[in-house]
Image (tube, rainbow, N blue to C red):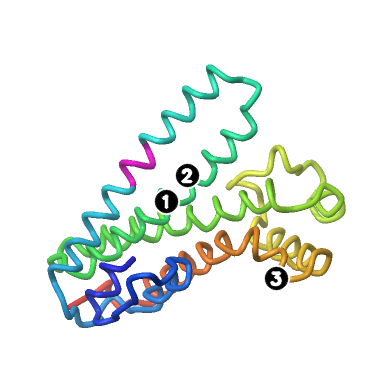
Amino acid sequence: RRAELHAFGHELQPDEDRMAFENTAAPIPLNTAIVDRKSIEEAIFQYDRAVALYQHADGEFVQHILRFRESEQLYESHRAEIHGLAALVEGDADYLKAMVAPPDQRAALVAAAVKSYSSAADLERVIILRYSVWQQVADQLYPTGVTKANVNEHTPQLAEITDKAVAAMEKAMGRETFLDDSGPYLQYIDRALTRVKLLQSAPSASAQ
């Protein structure tokens, strides 16, 4: 995130918490002038590297599950977080690549970024619905046949269910308490959706 922001002239304090600037760069349009080309290349490298590391970590968790079945639920929650973050940073990488790519390569990168960001938003919603919502709230709000155990990124009306569940949990726990636990997931969703809107509104996916 630091390299991405630096590429557009945003300076951060060395000790600034990452979640404080997680979405600072999200609204930057595709045609924004790049101030530091070296930083944009560093950001792309780091995002691509993060995807590879997340994929490796996921494989490690699978092996842990095979060896320690009693901890399967814990490791599955970790895997869910990894899948969501991998999709998000994959979208970030393609977004920045689209900004610097030759015109004939941009449309494919834009399409790839939209796909990754959309997947990331849904995967983060699933994390909230599986792990952050009380059972009694799920029983009241989830559609017939949908449970905390089987909700997934293909569940119909996933965004609407998530919005209702978040509102119910904020009312039950207090907004600040709920955000202490689930705030990062909501930030990731916001970043992903902000970027999708920018990508879908970009004329001919053109960037300079």
Q: Residue at x 12, y 66 (%)?
A: 102
**Mark 3 sits on what residue?**
176
Q: Position of residue 131 (x, y in %)?
A: 68, 47
| Residue 135 forms part of the magenta stretch | no
**Mark 1 sits on what residue?**
87
For disc 2, the neighbor class at 10 Å (few under 14, some 14 to 19, many from 20) is some
The chief SS type of the magenta part is helix
**In the depicted structure, whether residue 52 falls above or below residue 114:** above
The answer for how far apart the CA atoms under marks 2 and 1 are is 6 Å
Residue 206 shown left or right of residue 170 in the figure? left
Task: Mark 3 vs mark 1: give the one in front.
Answer: 3
The answer for how far apart the CA atoms under marks 2 and 3 are is 26 Å
Q: Residue at x 62, y 20 (%)?
A: 69
Q: Residue at x 65, y 53 (%)?
A: 128
Q: Position of residue 149 (x, y in %)?
A: 71, 38
For disc 3, the neighbor class at 10 Å (few under 14, some 14 to 19, many from 20) is few
Which amino acid lies under the numbered mark 3 shown in the image of this protein? Glu
**In the depicted structure, whether residue 65 falls above or below residue 142:** above
**Mark 2 sits on what residue?**
83
Magenta part of the protein: which range? Answer: 51-55
Q: Residue at x 34, y 53 (%)?
A: 90
Element assignment for label 1: helix
Which amino acid lies under the numbered mark 2 shown in the image of this protein? His
Q: Position of residue 1 (x, y in %)?
A: 34, 66
Q: Earlier in the sequence, mark 3 or mark 1?
A: 1
Mark 2 touches mark 1? (CB < 8 Å): yes
Mark 3 touches mark 1? (CB < 8 Å): no
Element assignment for label 3: helix
